Image: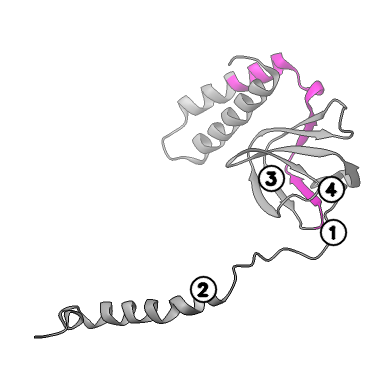
Amino acid sequence: HTHPLWRLPIARYRIMFAVRAARPLARAVPAVRAFSDAPAATVMSLNFSLPHMNIYADKTVDRVIIPGAEGVYGVTAGHTPIVSQLKPGVVEIVHEASGEPEKYFVSGGFALTHDTSVTDISAFEAVKLEDLDADAVKSAYTAAASAFSSAAEGSAEKAAAGVQMDTAKAMGDALGVAL
């Protein structure tokens, strides 16, 4: 009469043996989560930059809402470190907990939140939302849509017009304007 383990392929036998050997060790070592010994941050610092200027450098803020490529998310003091590509959308900066947010439309870029509660936003372009002209956004979208439809398939012109359409659409959404 043969042992049932001999019927198993050698690789499965080795895995079963390893699991059985590890079980006593797993029970002997308590599960411990590793956290930083640093005290939790109580303030958040923002650096908001464009290629040609800084909007904010080391500015203390309550929170920032960021249009990440994977979705819009908020950052407060003590946030988990994260790197995100920005999609065209609105960055909302809340200076005080009960205050109204300051809103900037950004065309894209990157955001990096450090474990020190510092968030860096580097955008290609940014304009205060209140400075956007709804009629100009509609005109830009119409012109980009026309260029997109008349450009040759696969051309750089078609790609550029597509980006312009997406950006104008995001501006329209930020302003509440249907395009």
Q: Which mark is residue 27?
A: 2
Q: Residue at x 60, y 71 (%)?
A: 30
Q: CA distance from mark 4 to mark 3?
A: 13 Å
Name the residue tied to disc 1: 39
- Residue 134 is situated, as x and y percent measured from the top left of the image, at 71, 16
Q: CA distance from mark 2 to mark 4?
A: 47 Å
Q: Which mark is residue 109?
A: 3
Q: CA distance from mark 2 to mark 3?
A: 47 Å
Secondary structure of residue under mark 2: helix
**Is disc 3 in contact with disc 1, using a CB cutoff of under 8 Å?**
no
Name the residue tied to disc 4: 47
Residue 123 sits inside the magenta stretch: yes
Mark 3 or mark 1: name the one nearer the start of the chain.
Answer: 1
Residue range corresponding to the magenta coloring: 116-141
Nearer the observer, 70 or 147: 70
**Is disc 2 in contact with disc 3, using a CB cutoff of under 8 Å?**
no
Using a 10 Å C-alpha cutoff, classify the residue at mark 2 as few (fewer than 14 neighbours), some (14 to 19) or many (20 or more): few
Q: CA distance from mark 3 to mark 1?
A: 31 Å
Q: Amino acid at mark 3?
A: Gly
